[in-house]
Amino acid sequence: MSETEVIDKDAVGQELGDEKDPTWRKRVRKAGVPSLLIAGGLGALGLLRSRFQHSQTFLPEKYPNGIWQPQGYGVPAEDTWFSSEDGTSLHGWWIPFKRAKGTVLYCHGNAGNITSRIGVYRFLRRTRLNVFAYDYRGYGRSDGRPTEAGVFSDARAAFDHLVNEIGEDPGRILILGHSLGGAVAIDLAMQRQAAGLVVQSTFTDLRDMARVRMPGVPLHLIARNQFRSIDKVPKLTLPKLFIHGTQDETIPISLGERLFESAAEPKQWYPVSHAGHNDVYRFGGFRYFWKLAGFCRRCLKQGLGDRSSLVEPAATNDDETVVSGR
């Protein structure tokens, strides 16, 4: 047997995993242990991602949880049903106002359902506008299970239902989104023409939210949902009003400021002093009401025409609104 043949047999034995060869065992241990650690680490991150997204992204409440008879609370809601693009059955409330000059399409946040915002609808009616609120898939009386693509699709279906079935003109529609609904409203404004957009207490994207909610844990690297509003607002040319409470502990005002700064003109920034995440309109009081009502009035007057003239009147000394820039 030649020396060359011996070497070849040893090489084959190591390649096939000859259990008598201690060198091969060491190599397996060196390669296998780190691989297992990496796999275990990725598995743990995946579990954390799942828990984070379950606890932070979608927290629906299904019917019959909630107040489904809002008429006794000053909200004359009418049930309306429509279908999303994939056929999912969705439920909404049409809340008319006599001789209204326009309609607010309301996209709610990630928790509860449309019945959780009765106070908001009552407040919005003071602007003398109709309100159309709806539930995303998996919320309230809507079928299905919520996903990022799904709730975006549901918003488009709600807008189309408002135009095609209820009969509202797109130039008389203002899109308003709160929290997660702000991201939904921004995406809707990318897909449908409307008179104006109001986003309140919302964020740049979910990766930034992951960094805020769980600092030190790299969930942002494997986040499944994105809601990347910060990439969309630079492309939106309709009038935009950004509202945020200065004491918001759920979505820090710094994220709202970054979103505003990234947005295209025309835009306005309105920080509400001392307000948290869900009480902005309460802390804002009359000033909040006049800011919102004035913005809506100017947008509806202009409709879908040239937006370059949509400049807010000069602010008073005690006014915190910034029309553009920082």
Image (cartoon, rainbow, N blue to C red):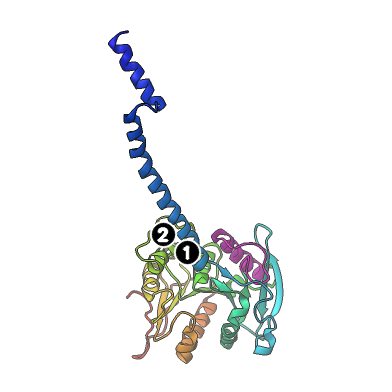
Query: Does the image show residue 61?
Result: yes
Residue 161 found in image quarter:
bottom right
Asked if residue 22 lies left or right of residue 219, the reply is left
Which quadrant holds the N terminus?
top left
Which stretch appears magenta?
136-163
Crowd tier of the residue under label 1, counting other residues whose Cα lies within 10 Å: few below 14, some 14–19, many 20 or above: some
The reply to whether callout 2 and callout 1 are in contact (CB within 8 Å) is yes
Disc 2 crowd rating (10 Å Cα; few below 14, some 14-19, many 20+) is many
Residue 178: percent from left, percent from top = 51, 75
Secondary structure of the residue carrying tag 2 is: helix
Quadrant in the picture for the C terminus? bottom left
Q: Does residue 147 show up magenta in the picture?
A: yes
- The picture quadrant where one finds residue 192 is bottom right
Residue 182: x and y in percent read 50, 71
Q: Which tag, 2 or 1, sits closer to the chain's start?
A: 1
**Which residue sits at x=32%, y=14%?**
6
With respect to residue 216, does 241 lie above or below?
A: below
Task: Residue 25: say if magenta.
Answer: no
Q: Is residue 145 left or right of residue 290?
A: right
Secondary structure type for disc 1 = helix
Position of 200 compared to 70: left or right?
left
Q: Is 165 on the left or on the right of 39, as rendered?
A: right
- Which residue occupies the foreground of this view, 237 or 205? 205
Looking at the image, which residue sits at the far top? 1
Specify the amino acid type for callout 2: Leu
Q: Is residue 52 above or below residue 67?
A: above
Image quadrant assignment for residue 9: top left
Q: Which mark is residue 219?
A: 2
Estimate the x, y position of residue 54 in percent, counting from the top left: 52, 64
Q: Pointer 1: what residue?
A: 52
Q: Amino acid at mark 1?
A: Phe
Q: CA distance from mark 2 to mark 1?
A: 8 Å
